[in-house]
Amino acid sequence: MKKSFSAMALLGLALLAFTLTGCTASRVEFDKSGIEKIGKLAVILYTVPESINYRDNPQDPPKKGLLQMATEMATANNGPTAASVAQKSFIENLNSKGLSFKAISQDEMMGNKAYRELATKKVQKQEEEKAAAKKEQDSSSAGKALGMLSSLSSAMGNNPGNEGASPEGIPNWGLAPSWSGAPSAIQGGADEKKFIKEAIAALGVDGAMIINDPGMSFSCDACIGGTGSGSTGSAFLATIVDKEGNVALEMRQWFAVSSGNAAMVTYAVNPLQHENLFTGHGEKMARVFSEYYKEEGGK
């Protein structure tokens, strides 16, 4: 009995500590010597869900109630816009934190001809592969049946149904299947790593940062029945690699509300206010990232 009580007490204390810390860092890897070699980097990949919708908890897979499902017409396929605005804001705010490295701006990255051609070629190839896979599935009766089951499962909230969205003109290798268990923001294996190294060379930087944010979602602060102050939540992975592709940092972090706010009514935010929330999302991510970075001894 005493042993059982002791175990339960320890579990309770652990849960309490987790709750009190709020945005808890889960340290995977931090190579100080590797980071110090990177003076300038580029946030080459930034992946979010295809549609940014409301979630009670950004760490959990999306679950759709009937009311939330009814509001999703206003958010369908807003992922590329969310990724572009949040990426731009993240970079700008990251550079204001006095870290040991600087990130080139979104405009500088997309204005680089060599990088833009590399990224455009990869985007086109991914779209062609996606279309071919869909055509093959649609051509078979088994594929049609699986597609119907997948759609039904997604509508019931059993499957996020998102392959991932990125800023226009930038490829992506999908969302992390599990934020809590994914070891890295890099999802595509050798093909993705090859692209990252080529992009670093094209941009003439010392390294790259990859962001994968499967938890990006609308949240509601101090709400009653889904009505109150709208914000965004995140459960993101960040990876930094050097020119050779060696990992210098792996991070897994989250936050429940961001710096932006907008009026939320029954879990819906006016689309005209989305950009303000996405800007605040990037700002909060930069703050969370830099706090973790400094806690781990980065300068």
Image (spheres, helix red, strand yellow):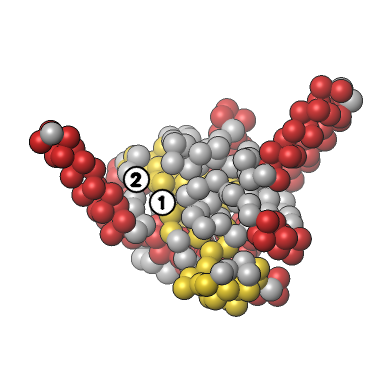
User: Does residue 123 sit above or below 231 in this rendering?
Assistant: above
Give the residue type at disc 1: Gln
Circle 1 Cα neighbour tier, 10 Å, few/some/many (<14 / 14–19 / ≥20):
many
On the rendered structure, is 13 left or right of 105? left
Q: Nearer the viewer, residue 53 or 64?
A: 64
Residue 187 spot, x, y in % from top left: 56, 35
User: Does residue 59 sit above or below 98 in this rendering?
Assistant: above
Quadrant of the drawing holding the C terminus: bottom left
Of helix, strand and loop, which one carries label 2?
Answer: loop
Residue tagged by mark 1?
A: 253
Contact, mark 2 vs mark 1 (Cβ under 8 Å):
yes
Give the residue type at disc 2: Ser
Residue 279 spot, x, y in % from top left: 57, 69
- Which picture quadrant has residue 22? bottom left
Residue at 34% in and 50% down: 25
Q: Nearer the viewer, residue 229 or 118?
A: 229
Circle 2 Cα neighbour tier, 10 Å, few/some/many (<14 / 14–19 / ≥20):
few
Count of marks, rendered view: 2
Of helix, strand and loop, which one carries label 1?
Answer: strand
On the rendered structure, is 25 left or right of 175? left
User: Does residue 89 sit above or below 59 in this rendering?
Assistant: below
For the residues labelled 2 and 1, the Cα–Cα distance comes to 7 Å
- Which picture quadrant has residue 230? bottom right
Residue tagged by mark 2?
A: 26
Residue at 68% in and 50% down: 50
Mark nearer the N terminus (2 vs 1): 2
Quadrant of the drawing holding the N terminus: top left
Residue 254 spot, x, y in % from top left: 43, 54
